[in-house]
Amino acid sequence: MTPVLVRQHLPHAGPVPRADLGARARDWSEIQERMLVPLYEAVYGRLDVGSGTRLLSLGCGSGLALVMAASRGAALTGVEASSPARLALARERLLRETWGAQTRADIRLTDRLPAEPAGARTPAYTLVTAFEPIGRVAGDAEELAELLTAATPLARRGAPVVLVGWGPPERCATSAVLRVAARLADQDRGTVRLRPALRDDLEDVARRTGLRPDGSGRVACPFGYADVDSALKGLLSTGLFDAAVAATDQAQVEKEMTEALHPYRRADGTVWMPNVFRYLIARTR
């Protein structure tokens, strides 16, 4: 939102239809990834991200949140394991740009967690972020907990770890479109299940991974698109509709998504869907 916004690879999602993964990654980068910019800004402002920050970003997508952190002076490690195409776009954004007079040497992008533990030669991370929201797909909390269990030993004691979840369905207009994915996929084998976001989802993940909750917030992140075609491209780039396409076909999925988007079309043809996301700041022990 990988990633998200939902995770690109859904647990038990069945066969994934053939797709132009490069085009999908570009749609993510150019259309969908920016939808969570208000969330990134709120978190970075609250935690005073700057030149003293050493950030580990889990599910960094095509790197927009990293660009924002880098502009504040943070040192970065971005991990994107689910999409080589998104990772390639992140490298284009971050490794080929110059920051001031010199190319930044403190930016690292990889498809796996760093192997080296924190120590004298490897400074510990001072901030860990997992910006892909949970709270819509069965198993997403367990997937996040597993990832954090592996990642948090790389952070210093007391470092903030940021977890993100969807708000309640009544506060998230995009829920209406996500229900299309669940219903169409269920015609096949019932492999994708949407679930209601629960208030304590993030706290439960923190507790299971040994983190100490230390504050939370809510941020309005409306999904706005120039037209229905852009909305379809952006939403399909998340990967959540792959199982629905496999169970039916692309044309059927796009037809039903278009119908679900109809209440959110404005007179000028734009699409506007208000959403609320919640974030939790937890601390390593």
Image (cartoon, grey):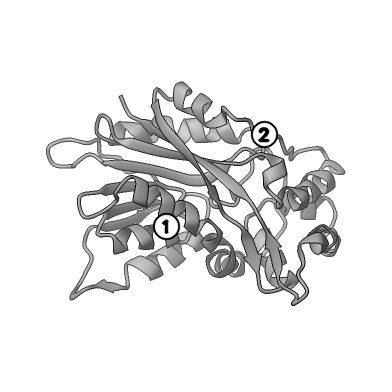
Front in this rendered view, residue 64 or 168: 168
Residue 158, x across and y down, in percent: 27, 30
Q: Specify the label residue 260 is tagged with.
A: none
Question: Residue, x 35% and y 56% (percent of image)?
Answer: 109
Question: Which circle's residue, 1 or 2, is located before the other in the chain?
Answer: 1
Mark 2 Cα shell of 10 Å, populated few (<14), some (14-19), many (≥20): some
Q: Is residue 6 visible?
A: no
Identify the residue at horizontal 48%, vertical 59% (top origin): 37
Residue visible at 57% across and 32% down in the picture: 141
Could you say whether the residue bearing mark 1 is in a helix, strand or loop?
Answer: helix
Compare residues 95 and 51 and report the one nearer the observer: 51
User: How many marks on residues?
Assistant: 2
User: The residue under label 1 is which amino acid type?
Assistant: Ala
The label number, if any, that marks residue 138 in the structure image: 2
Mark 1 vs mark 2, foreground winner is 1
The residue positioned farthest toward the left in the image shown: 120
x%, y% of residue 163?
Answer: 47, 38
Label 1, label 2: how far apart the Cα atoms are: 26 Å
Q: Amino acid at mark 2?
A: Ala
- Quarter of the image for residue 135 reads top right
